């Protein structure tokens, strides 16, 4: 049985004004960029997509370290989006943009084989069987990803929820992905890679983080 504890995010002060101040990094009509996302940043060689970027720590640091990659981050929660957008704007990152939308609409925003990598970090496990189709690693979502990923494209997946991780490994294998780099304790020997805000919190509490890479065959 998958378990989850939901934490409600506080409403951010002056949220709308703050979002407007970061308008340059927020894509309000993503469908207009379908098939031509790389035009946003000439010189970038490929597009990476993060689903549910939260407050954007991982997003901003990863984009900063890979200026040759165009990073797009989907986040539907305005109170998280405003913090993520401010982080990007403050660092003046020219290769990072945010899409205030839902992952179910990926087909409307991206052409076939347009994305080289997808990041899924600490998504909601949707614990009951009737909620399973809402998990971002369920067969329905994997079908969406397979359409927009290039051949050999990757999904990088992290979670603190081991039952969700085990479920996801099964779904990747059954839906045309080759799974590798599997670990049940990513930070056993210290922080590995770029962490999210949640990840730093979990690490501080001594909670193990599961991670894997799934490559489209």
Image (spheres, rainbow, N blue to C red):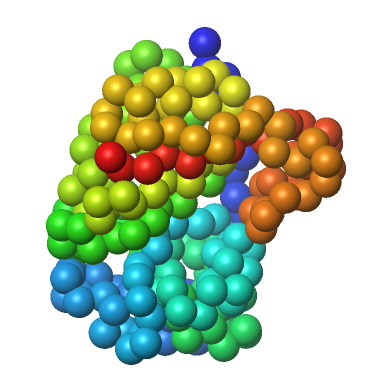
Residue 95 as seen in the image, left or right of residue 29: right
Residue 202 as seen in the image, left or right of residue 84: right
Where residue 82 appears, as percent x and y from the top left, is 53, 69
Where residue 155 appears, as percent x and y from the top left, is 41, 46
**Res 27 quadrant in image:** bottom left
**Res 135 quadrant in image:** top left
Q: Is residue 194 visible?
A: yes
The residue that appears at 48% across and 46% down in the rendered structure is 156
- Specify the quadrant that holds the C terminus: top left
Where residue 175 appears, as percent x and y from the top left, is 27, 29
Q: Is residue 160 visible?
A: no
Give above or below for 202 relative to 164. below
Depth check: give the residue in front, 80 or 30: 30
The residue that appears at 30% across and 23% down in the rendered structure is 174
The residue that appears at 62% across and 69% down in the rendered structure is 61
Depth check: give the residue in front, 17 or 70: 70
Give above or below for 188 relative to 169. below
Number of marks in the image? 0
Where residue 32 appears, as percent x and y from the top left, is 16, 75
Residue furthest to the top in view is 1
Residue 202 as seen in the image, left or right of residue 143: right
Depth check: give the residue in front, 106 or 180: 180
The residue that appears at 48% across and 41% down in the rendered structure is 213
């Amino acid at each position: 049985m998958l378990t989850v504890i939901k934490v409600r995010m506080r409403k951010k002060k002056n949220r709308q004004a703050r979002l407007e101040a970061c308008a340059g990094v927020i894509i309000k009509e993503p469908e207009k960029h379908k098939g031509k996302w790389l035009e946003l940043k000439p010189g970038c060689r490929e597009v990476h997509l993060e689903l549910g970027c939260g407050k954007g720590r991982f997003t901003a640091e990863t984009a900063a370290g890979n200026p040759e990659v165009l990073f797009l981050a989907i986040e539907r929660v305005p109170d998280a989006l405003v913090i993520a957008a401010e982080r990007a704007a403050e660092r003046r990152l020219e290769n990072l943009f945010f899409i205030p939308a839902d992952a179910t609409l990926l087909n409307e925003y991206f052409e076939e084989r347009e994305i080289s990598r997808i990041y899924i970090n600490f998504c909601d496990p949707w614990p009951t069987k009737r909620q399973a189709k809402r998990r971002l690693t369920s067969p329905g979502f994997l079908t969406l990803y397979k359409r927009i990923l290039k051949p050999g494209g990757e999904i990088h997946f992290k979670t603190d929820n081991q039952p969700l991780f085990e479920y996801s490994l099964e779904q990747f294998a059954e839906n045309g992905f080759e799974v590798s780099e599997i670990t049940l304790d990513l930070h056993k020997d210290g922080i590995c890679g770029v962490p999210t805000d949640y990840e730093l919190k979990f690490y501080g509490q001594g909670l193990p983080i599961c991670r894997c890479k799934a490559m489209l065959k």
